Image (spheres, coloured by chain):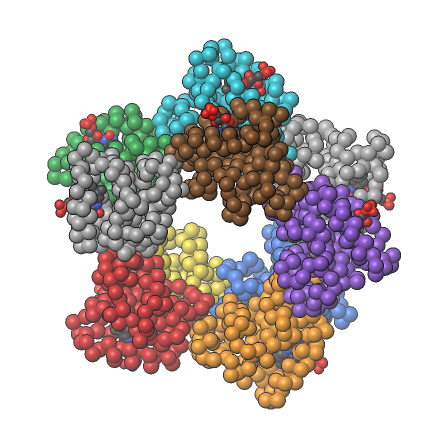
Chain colours: A orange, B purple, C brown, E cyan, G blue, H green, I red, J yellow
Amino acid sequence: MFLTRLVYASKKSPKFCSSDIDDILETARKHNGSLGITGLLCFNRQYFLQALEGPRSAINSTYYRITQDKRHSDMLILSYEEIRERNYGSWNMGYVPESSLTAPQTLKYSIGSEFDPFSMSSKSACMLLNDLSKTVPII
Amino acid sequence: MFLTRLVYASKKSPKFCSSDIDDILETARKHNGSLGITGLLCFNRQYFLQALEGPRSAINSTYYRITQDKRHSDMLILSYEEIRERNYGSWNMGYVPESSLTAPQTLKYSIGSEFDPFSMSSKSACMLLNDLSKTVPII
Amino acid sequence: MFLTRLVYASKKSPKFCSSDIDDILETARKHNGSLGITGLLCFNRQYFLQALEGPRSAINSTYYRITQDKRHSDMLILSYEEIRERNYGSWNMGYVPESSLTAPQTLKYSIGSEFDPFSMSSKSACMLLNDLSKTVPII
Amino acid sequence: MFLTRLVYASKKSPKFCSSDIDDILETARKHNGSLGITGLLCFNRQYFLQALEGPRSAINSTYYRITQDKRHSDMLILSYEEIRERNYGSWNMGYVPESSLTAPQTLKYSIGSEFDPFSMSSKSACMLLNDLSKTVPII
Amino acid sequence: MFLTRLVYASKKSPKFCSSDIDDILETARKHNGSLGITGLLCFNRQYFLQALEGPRSAINSTYYRITQDKRHSDMLILSYEEIRERNYGSWNMGYVPESSLTAPQTLKYSIGSEFDPFSMSSKSACMLLNDLSKTVPII
Amino acid sequence: MFLTRLVYASKKSPKFCSSDIDDILETARKHNGSLGITGLLCFNRQYFLQALEGPRSAINSTYYRITQDKRHSDMLILSYEEIRERNYGSWNMGYVPESSLTAPQTLKYSIGSEFDPFSMSSKSACMLLNDLSKTVPII
Amino acid sequence: MFLTRLVYASKKSPKFCSSDIDDILETARKHNGSLGITGLLCFNRQYFLQALEGPRSAINSTYYRITQDKRHSDMLILSYEEIRERNYGSWNMGYVPESSLTAPQTLKYSIGSEFDPFSMSSKSACMLLNDLSKTVPII
Amino acid sequence: MFLTRLVYASKKSPKFCSSDIDDILETARKHNGSLGITGLLCFNRQYFLQALEGPRSAINSTYYRITQDKRHSDMLILSYEEIRERNYGSWNMGYVPESSLTAPQTLKYSIGSEFDPFSMSSKSACMLLNDLSKTVPII
Amino acid sequence: MFLTRLVYASKKSPKFCSSDIDDILETARKHNGSLGITGLLCFNRQYFLQALEGPRSAINSTYYRITQDKRHSDMLILSYEEIRERNYGSWNMGYVPESSLTAPQTLKYSIGSEFDPFSMSSKSACMLLNDLSKTVPII
Amino acid sequence: MFLTRLVYASKKSPKFCSSDIDDILETARKHNGSLGITGLLCFNRQYFLQALEGPRSAINSTYYRITQDKRHSDMLILSYEEIRERNYGSWNMGYVPESSLTAPQTLKYSIGSEFDPFSMSSKSACMLLNDLSKTVPII
Ligand SMILES: Cc1cc2nc3c(=O)[nH]c(=O)nc-3n(C[C@H](O)[C@H](O)[C@H](O)COP(=O)(O)O)c2cc1C
Ligand SMILES: Cc1cc2nc3c(=O)[nH]c(=O)nc-3n(C[C@H](O)[C@H](O)[C@H](O)COP(=O)(O)O)c2cc1C
Ligand SMILES: Cc1cc2nc3c(=O)[nH]c(=O)nc-3n(C[C@H](O)[C@H](O)[C@H](O)COP(=O)(O)O)c2cc1C
Ligand SMILES: Cc1cc2nc3c(=O)[nH]c(=O)nc-3n(C[C@H](O)[C@H](O)[C@H](O)COP(=O)(O)O)c2cc1C
Ligand SMILES: Cc1cc2nc3c(=O)[nH]c(=O)nc-3n(C[C@H](O)[C@H](O)[C@H](O)COP(=O)(O)O)c2cc1C
Ligand SMILES: Cc1cc2nc3c(=O)[nH]c(=O)nc-3n(C[C@H](O)[C@H](O)[C@H](O)COP(=O)(O)O)c2cc1C
Ligand SMILES: Cc1cc2nc3c(=O)[nH]c(=O)nc-3n(C[C@H](O)[C@H](O)[C@H](O)COP(=O)(O)O)c2cc1C
Ligand SMILES: Cc1cc2nc3c(=O)[nH]c(=O)nc-3n(C[C@H](O)[C@H](O)[C@H](O)COP(=O)(O)O)c2cc1C
Ligand SMILES: Cc1cc2nc3c(=O)[nH]c(=O)nc-3n(C[C@H](O)[C@H](O)[C@H](O)COP(=O)(O)O)c2cc1C
Ligand SMILES: Cc1cc2nc3c(=O)[nH]c(=O)nc-3n(C[C@H](O)[C@H](O)[C@H](O)COP(=O)(O)O)c2cc1C
């Protein structure tokens, strides 16, 4: 019953190949749709940054499932909180492709213009996701 | 003298038949008009979510009367508070029909896209009602 | 030296006759003008609701004089506070006639659609007066 | 899952006889113990004032059951809110007998020294219950 | 139903004679006790400063009655507010005699060491009364 | 180094003759320009109300110099505070002539429609100056 | 570099046998000591509730390792936040045995007197842990 | 009617001789007593720091009079504010002699251990005076 | 990992010659670009005022390097804080030339119309930089 | 005139030998005493953590001088702010020797029990210094 949002970062693993992103999105949208999960995923061929929002237990079981995925590693939770209202309610898993992660937008919230969510504070990471969801086309 | 708002959810009972909704609205508007009660009712053929605002004692006697109604059951108070100003002052009982309870609007405040007020936090339920009163046509 | 606002309600007494309202306004404006008092008066042929703002001592002596007036009774102070800025500075005594006290506007701040300031909380009464001064023509 | 507190007032009905209070407490404690409900009940042979705290759904079903009880009537909700922590966790249903509802303590939060919760604001009623739980012996 | 506190100042009139204070207190206590009013009265043979707390309507009718009393004049409301809890609940009308209105205590909240409530801001007057009720013997 | 704003009122003295205002403004602008002082001066042929903002020490030496000026008397500081940002930065000494001190604007912040800064609270005086700087032509 | 606290709940799995708790604590303390992690663990032979505080990356890798442990399942994050100061700095992994999870202390923050962290809100769970660390002997 | 506190610093002038301090205190106490002024004066044979509290107009006329005193110069207002309650109500002009202006106490609020109020921010100067009034013997 | 902003002022040294400003900007932009630093530099041929934002360690090493530069001296930190979001993210080192440091804009935040950051409070200096970045063309 | 506090960390350089600490303290106290600087220094034979408080310009010149000292390197500012009151006013440079930097106290504010101020957030570093100044003997 507790609506929750989790934001995490991870690193592409050697197992990841470039067509995987489509599979991930397809699977994510199918599962998330049935579990009441919405969210946003950023990827720059090196790092992932993802927001998941939905029922507290579904967020946890999905996050657990994602931790088992060999296509990425080093998962790092950046933020986890009870919410009243979703921010990414329009997408079962919106996708911000690399081309939209432009240097200026990244730089505004990061210590450098390369997108590297591991070096971001949790507040800055959440602000970047929110900013992207309002300014770039979500696929 | 205390202006009060009560929000509750309930479940359609087997006794409910589809023409009942018109009767409920007609009776509600007649009674509420004479008691100084205004409000909003959502119904998706399974659950009710209703806001009642008016004098503290009238809100309580009306709520009591509604608890006795065999057309629904499992009444669950979500919020009850003293107010300075009504939110639904334009309707003795405004009605949000099922067609307006679209998945996106529901999902924004709920753990799923099916309208199920029993799984909502009280703050989210109040925010959904308020949002509906401003964005969909009220009958 | 203390700029003050007092809001009170009262009931028309049997001594009141319908032409009295013009006399009251004429006298009020004459006195208030010379005492630095501004304000707003609502009347629905049954109840008065009046805001008086000006110097603390003038507000008190005028309020005292009004308490002695046999054309109304049951005076009830709703609010009394030191202010920095007047709300009704444009009128020595603005008048909101019955026709402007419409049911919807009354209902928004009251327990019923009949204008009855005795049943209002002080905050709601002040909000109604403020709302009226901005939305209806003041005579 | 939502821990909730409900405070209501009611009036003794003609059906109530003086031995009923022991029955009420016995039944209340038995049911409440099994439902995770704790609380406090005041009674002065005329009015009841009761706080119930526990799981949101149990609070609602118990409140509904109590509304059906013919030994009292005119139930009036005074306050309903989600809580983080119980105030009356030590008692499945603590009892404040009439002898502890002394005039001074009542007067501090009421418009008169007779205990009459119907004339209390919700904040004052909650403050009185809290004050009693800390200052008088709870049976 | 609205618990209210009114604080006012007034001046002894020529009609006042020194034995009147006992009459005033006796009458005040009798009336206040039956109306649910409590309060505190200060008097220095020149000025009165009084706090009245109780039901909103009783405060208003009593205040009106006191305005008609020829033993004082120039009544000046200093403060009027809805309250949750009484400050002077122990006294139907507590009395602070002149001997307790010492220069230091007066000076702390006033522009001079002579007790003159007409020259006090409303906040200072309320703070002085509250301070007195906690530090000097109330008769 | 501390940027400071001082607001004071004073009374025209018998020594003042009507051409003095031009001299005052000319001298003020010359001195203020060299001291980093900006401000606003109101005058209605009876009272002055002036805001001076700039370096703390310059404000004090200038204020001292102005106190010695025989063309006015009864200087009364209304407000003195450290500021981050000037309000009257566009004028070395802006002038609001009597014709701009209209009754309505004065009345909004004063106990009467005659401009009399001695009877104003410090907050109201500052609000009037700020309001004037934004709504009337400054000479 | 970001000091972080994570609180989660989990369920004992069929693989768990009663001597495991000592192994878990021993391993936990060894690892945590070397990683700069401190915390508190509650266990009632059915549920675990654990707080882990330390460097953000160590918290994440340890949490990941704990998710792989077959002795429990259904891990549910309750709270995750950046902190300035540790709450459980005295213990590499403090242990609250079942005997200290008394009904009254549990009931104060839960919907029932059985310790079941899955039914707790995140705020209540954190408050229970904090309360335990101050009131019961930590092993 | 507005109770006000002014704090200023000044420098001893060549005209000042060491016996003057007694004269100043004697005169100050006589005048202040009759004007309702209380306060505190610090002096270290070089600088004065003084707080004056009382009626707004008396504070201003006294401050003006003090500005004319040839025994000091360079007067610098540090703080001026409306107050509800005096801080130095026990002294018509309390005196903190040089021996009580110890280096540690001065240093805590100043940029150096030499008492030099000209280099203090207004908040620090007020905090030093308040601290002194509570910790050193006032003459 | 901590995104940080440092604002400092300095004075042109005798070693500085007018062509140096182009060298400084060229070097600054090259280094800053590679270190993830953005910022703004003001110069009026006498004083520098510069904001540097980026990773905490890069800000410190760059600031250290700048302190060694013989072209300026008397470096004075005005503000240093952890930030969530950059203000000057569009410029590796934006430049506000002397012609844009107009007297009015300077005066608004300073004690004089000559740009002299040494005499500014830290809040005013930050406000001036922010204001400039939004109102004048940045080179 | 602006009282300021700067907190920084640095690393012992190869040039440092163990007797240097006494020299540093002796020099620091001599200089600081004459500049109005107070503070606290922690050292664990590897890292320094130092708070300096005093006049803004003295803090900056001293900090600059300390940056030139070859006995340490990698200076990292952690916090810099205007203050009203000193925290370390009792010491021209208090010293917390290694033996007082116990693991528990360090761990409470750090990611590990080894004292390493480079890995601390600025708030945690300031809290550790403040805590030490109150709990361990300062040399
Ligand atoms: C970066 C990343 C993000 C993912 N996001 C989701 C997601 O939002 N929802 C989801 O169900 N699976 C997501 N997955 C996929 C899961 O890890 C896992 O492959 C999938 O849930 C397994 O589904 P299946 O059992 O139907 O094959 C994600 C995987 C990666 C690498
Ligand atoms: C979901 C629901 C909402 C209702 N809302 C109201 C209402 O707002 N006001 C009202 O008087 N009756 C309402 N009713 C109807 C009452 O339960 C009850 O039937 C009615 O007040 C009885 O009126 P009667 O005694 O005139 O037949 C509602 C009933 C249901 C099932
Ligand atoms: C509802 C009501 C409102 C009034 N408002 C004012 C008022 O704002 N100012 C005023 O001077 N008199 C007001 N009066 C009139 C006074 O009660 C009183 O008649 C009048 O001040 C007497 O003036 P006179 O002595 O010049 O006849 C009001 C009277 C009523 C009944
Ligand atoms: C004033 C009052 C307070 C009551 N409080 C409770 C209560 O806290 N819990 C409860 O279960 N029953 C309470 N009851 C009793 C219920 O109304 C009802 O009689 C009881 O729950 C029925 O239990 P039974 O079905 O086991 O007979 C209360 C009754 C009254 C009149
Ligand atoms: C300063 C002052 C304070 C008074 N306070 C009260 C009071 O608190 N309550 C009250 O009923 N009467 C109070 N009175 C007395 C009333 O003015 C009035 O005389 C009394 O209520 C009339 O009562 P009676 O009609 O029974 O003679 C006060 C009078 C004065 C002069
Ligand atoms: C109401 C009033 C306002 C004044 N404002 C200023 C002022 O803002 N700045 C100023 O330098 N002098 C001001 N003056 C003038 C000073 O009192 C004084 O005459 C002047 O500074 C003396 O300058 P002088 O020595 O060059 O003749 C003002 C005078 C009056 C009466
Ligand atoms: C409820 C529970 C709590 C645990 N807590 C910790 C812990 O705080 N730190 C830790 O390192 N391991 C903890 N463990 C153990 C880990 O799951 C895992 O067994 C251990 O880290 C593996 O260590 P090893 O690789 O040295 O055997 C916990 C296990 C359980 C079931
Ligand atoms: C530092 C200082 C502080 C003073 N404080 C006061 C004071 O608080 N009240 C006061 O009336 N005079 C004070 N005076 C004295 C006045 O400047 C002035 O001499 C005195 O009010 C004149 O009084 P007289 O006209 O009765 O001689 C102070 C003087 C100095 C130098
Ligand atoms: C006012 C001023 C501002 C400067 N700003 C920067 C800067 O933002 N970044 C930077 O790397 N160097 C800046 N510099 C230049 C450095 O002091 C130094 O000359 C430069 O970093 C050395 O680079 P190099 O070793 O490549 O020659 C600035 C110098 C001055 C005088
Ligand atoms: C960790 C550390 C802290 C220091 N703290 C201070 C200090 O607080 N004040 C100071 O003047 N010098 C301090 N010094 C010494 C200065 O770096 C420098 O050696 C000294 O100010 C030079 O003084 P001298 O020119 O008199 O030799 C510190 C040095 C180190 C390494």
Q: Residue furthest right?
A: B15
Q: What residue appears at the point 46 percent right and 72 percent down from the top-left corner?
A: A109
Q: What residue appears at the point 40 percent right and 24 percent down from the top-left corner?
A: E116
Q: Residue furthest left?
A: H14
The quadrant the N terminus of chain H occupies is top left
Residue G131, image x and y in percent? Answer: 62, 52
Whether E79 is drawn above or below A113: the answer is above
Count the labels in the image: 0
Residue B6 falls left or right of residue G33: right
Residue J18, image x and y in percent? Answer: 33, 67
* I57 vs A107, nearest the viewer: A107
Residue H17 falls left or right of residue C126: left
Whether A36 is drawn above or below H19: the answer is below
Residue J132, image x and y in percent? Answer: 42, 55
Q: Please say whether residue A47 is visible from this viewpoint.
A: yes
Q: Please say whether residue I118 is visible from this viewpoint.
A: no
The quadrant the C terminus of chain H occupies is top left
Residue I77, image x and y in percent? Answer: 31, 63
Whether G61 is drawn above or below G116: the answer is below
Q: What residue appears at the point 60 percent right and 87 percent down from the top-left corner?
A: A16
Q: What residue appears at the point 61 percent right and 26 percent down from the top-left corner?
A: C13
* C106 vs G126, nearest the viewer: C106
For residue H71, which quarter of the picture? top left
Residue E122 falls left or right of residue E63: left
Q: Residue furthest front?
A: C19
Residue G18 falls left or right of residue C116: right
Whether B69 is drawn above or below I44: the answer is above
* A115 vs E134, nearest the viewer: A115
For residue I48, which quarter of the picture? bottom left
